[in-house]
């Protein structure tokens, strides 16, 4: 299957390469034959939506606080395999299931499918790569999920993970206590990977804990940098500054 996919990808790469580097979704794939080739290639990456969620896929989101999605609407993006452009798709990220829902067109009538969870597959979103990874949480649990590459550094790569948790609502116990609606709550986590190390670790939300994860040779300098610039890594901008410094 890998050989077939690469042949299909190669057939359309030349017409989409410029769009790949600009981060923009191309509006013309160069004719009906190339559109058909792209569509056939894309089909290889689609599968059924998570069965556990299938029963709730028509959920009325207006009845809940929040959403299981990072955005309820499908947005255009580029699908890549092994860093080669496969074609254009529309996606919606279900952060509750950590599953990417896919359409080939923007039509509301088109049923959506799920993107296969393959580590060679990625989406180009706002010029940043979203892909399926294996990583280690702060609790030392090894899990799989989707990470967005925020920074590709000379020494450290910085990733972001968006996830959603569902909390069941509670009915009003009496006239003095209001009912609590069911809600989806969004969380953001950050991870890093050192160059040459086959492991992605969660970044703790405390400066002192991060220092313990950094190479001993850089700890004292980073400690001074954090203090002099009054940085708090709970803030994404501050965290980005820290990794800019580590990669400088």
Image: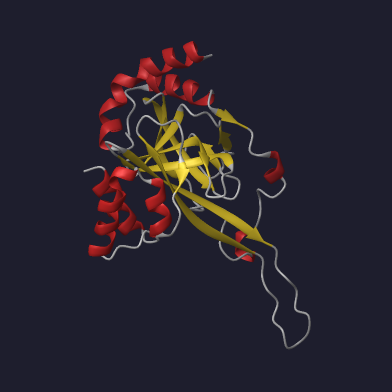
- Nearest to the observer: residue 239 or residue 47: 239
Relative placement, left or right, of 248 versus 164 is left
Measuring 51% from the left and 57% from the top, which residue is drawn there? 187
Q: What residue sits 68% from the left and 45% below the top?
A: 53
Asked if residue 153 lies left or right of residue 36, the reply is left
Q: Position of residue 116 (x, y in %)?
A: 56, 30
Comparing 218 with 152, the one in front is 218
Total residue callouts: 0
Q: Image quadrant for the C terminus?
A: top left
Asked whether, in this view, residue 181 is left or right of residue 80, the answer is right
- Residue name at image x 55 percent, y 32 percent: 117
Residue 178 sits above or below residue 211 on the image: below
Question: Percent from the top left, x then y, of residue 24?
Answer: 30, 38
Q: Is residue 190 visible?
A: yes
Q: 7 and 109: which one is in front? A: 7
Residue 99 rendering spot, x and y as whole percentages: 56, 41
The image quadrant where one finds the N terminus is top right
Q: Residue at x 34, y 44 (%)?
A: 216
Color theme of the render? secondary structure
The percent coordinates of residue 2 (x first, y second) are 50, 15
Q: Is residue 106 visible?
A: no
- Displayed quadrant of residue 83: top left
Q: Residue furthest right?
A: 174
């Amino acid at each position: 299957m890998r050989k077939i996919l690469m042949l299909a990808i190669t057939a359309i790469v030349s017409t989409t390469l410029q769009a790949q580097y600009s981060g923009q979704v191309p509006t013309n794939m160069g004719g009906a034959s190339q559109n058909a080739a792209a569509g056939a290639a894309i089909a290889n990456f689609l599968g059924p939506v998570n069965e556990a969620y299938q029963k709730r896929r028509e959920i009325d989101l207006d009845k809940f606080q929040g959403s299981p999605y990072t955005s309820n609407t499908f947005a255009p993006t580029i699908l890549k395999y092994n860093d080669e452009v496969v074609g254009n798709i529309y996606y919606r990220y279900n952060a509750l299931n950590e599953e990417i829902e896919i359409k080939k067109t923007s039509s509301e009538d088109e049923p959506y499918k799920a993107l296969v969870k393959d580590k060679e597959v990625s989406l180009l979103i706002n010029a940043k790569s979203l892909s399926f990874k294996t990583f280690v949480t702060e609790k030392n649990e090894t899990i799989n999920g989707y990470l967005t590459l925020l920074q590709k550094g000379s020494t450290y790569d910085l990733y972001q993970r968006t996830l959603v948790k569902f909390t069941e609502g509670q009915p009003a116990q009496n006239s003095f206590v209001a009912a609590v609606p069911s809600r989806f709550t969004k969380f953001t986590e950050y991870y890093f990977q050192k160059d040459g190390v086959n492991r992605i670790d969660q970044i703790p939300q405390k400066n002192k804990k991060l220092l313990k994860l950094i190479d001993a040779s850089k700890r004292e300098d980073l400690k001074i940098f954090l203090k002099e610039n009054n940085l708090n890594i709970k803030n994404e901008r501050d965290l980005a500054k820290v990794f800019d410094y580590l990669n400088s």
